[in-house]
Amino acid sequence: MKRAVILLVVLLGFFCVKSRAGNQKPVVLQVQWFPQAQFAGYLMAKEKGLFQVEGIDVEVRFSDEHTSPITELLEGRADFCTAWISQTLTLGKPIVNICQVLQKSSLMLVAKKESGILKPEDMNGKTIAIWGGDFSIQPYAFFRKFNIKPNLVPQAYNIDAFLVGAYDVASAMYYNEFNKFYLSGIDQDELVQFFYSDYGLNFPEDGIYCTSLTYEKKPELCRKMRRGILKGWEYAFDHEEETLDILMEYCEKFHVRTNRAHQKWMLNAIKEAVVYQVGDDPTKWGVLKKDDFLRVAEELKQQGFIRTVPQYENFYKE
């Protein structure tokens, strides 16, 4: 019944607003990378007419390693972008969060059980690979919390070095690299998982951002984007196989090296992050909880990235 209602709304809304939306200038949503299940909700909102139901024409733009969605936003080439709280807070720019899509951090450390690293304290003196920039904030907080003095090395955006034992502990995103370990031939029970979220360091990741000026001058557009995005994620989770069909078409078009099994893993892992501590009811999705915001902001202040903690009400606009 629920799916039938969604489909009826899609069809009616699509035909009612198609002409009006077709005459509008596209609203640009810039995401952080090439097509993958991390962005499935936005793609399904576009492909199934859920943005058009809201009366907006949305263009989803992808990024490569040289493209910063936040820069695209600030320089006016994008109207909205996906980003992390830690990224936007450190800029000191007039940017606001209108929808916190992911409630749980998927960033983690991974070790092989055969290394003997079974708890955080076992990492002391070990060689640990981490990514730079915003990806390094949680690791440093983790090391400080457990008084770990590691030998840090930079990590590339592949898993090859970890597979051959170049370092003891690797960084990974649960929805991406962790599954690649499995696909490479390592069973998950051979690995030890260290989720930062399990150690009081949950820094929610992908949220939807716009400039303060956009929010002040176009609040209704922001509301429409939020509704369309959340409906897109609801549709994606309720229609997994159709979502994967469309997603793989995007991956083929943009020459993304992947496979359906990996994208299915990613989609389910992303769902875990969307519903984390808020449940399966879509009406409760998309909220940036104040405690999460303050946790990230206080850690950024402690590490010297920001001087003061901004007001939550000025940062998050529901």
Image (spheres, grey):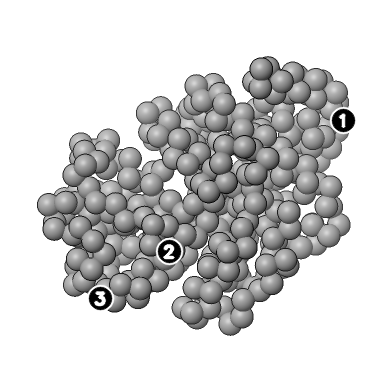
Residue count near mark 3 (Cα–Cα under 10 Å), binned few <14, some 14–19, many ≥20: some
Q: Are marks 2 and 3 in contact (CB under 8 Å)?
A: no
First in residue order: circle 3 vs circle 1: 1
First in residue order: circle 2 vs circle 3: 3
Q: Is residue 165 visible?
A: yes
Above or below, 222 against 198 in this view is above
Check disc 3 and report the residue beneath it: 149
Tell me what residue is drawn at x 63 percent, y 56 percent.
288
The three-letter code of the residue at mark 2 reads Gly
- Find the distance from the CA under tag 2 to the CA under tag 1: 47 Å
Q: Nearer the viewer, residue 281 or 272?
A: 281
Check disc 1 and report the residue beneath it: 20
The three-letter code of the residue at mark 1 reads Arg
How many marks on residues? Answer: 3
- Find the distance from the CA under tag 2 to the CA under tag 3: 19 Å
Above or below, 40 against 141 in this view is above
At mark 3, the secondary structure is loop
Q: Indicate which label's residue lies in the foreground, 2 or 3.
A: 2
Picture coordinates of residue 155 (x, y %)?
Answer: 31, 59
Q: Indicate which label's residue lies in the foreground, 2 or 1.
A: 2
Tell me what residue is drawn at x 47 percent, y 59 percent.
202
Above or below, 5 against 124 in this view is above
Identify the disc placed on residue 89. Answer: none
Check disc 2 and report the residue beneath it: 200
The three-letter code of the residue at mark 3 reads Lys
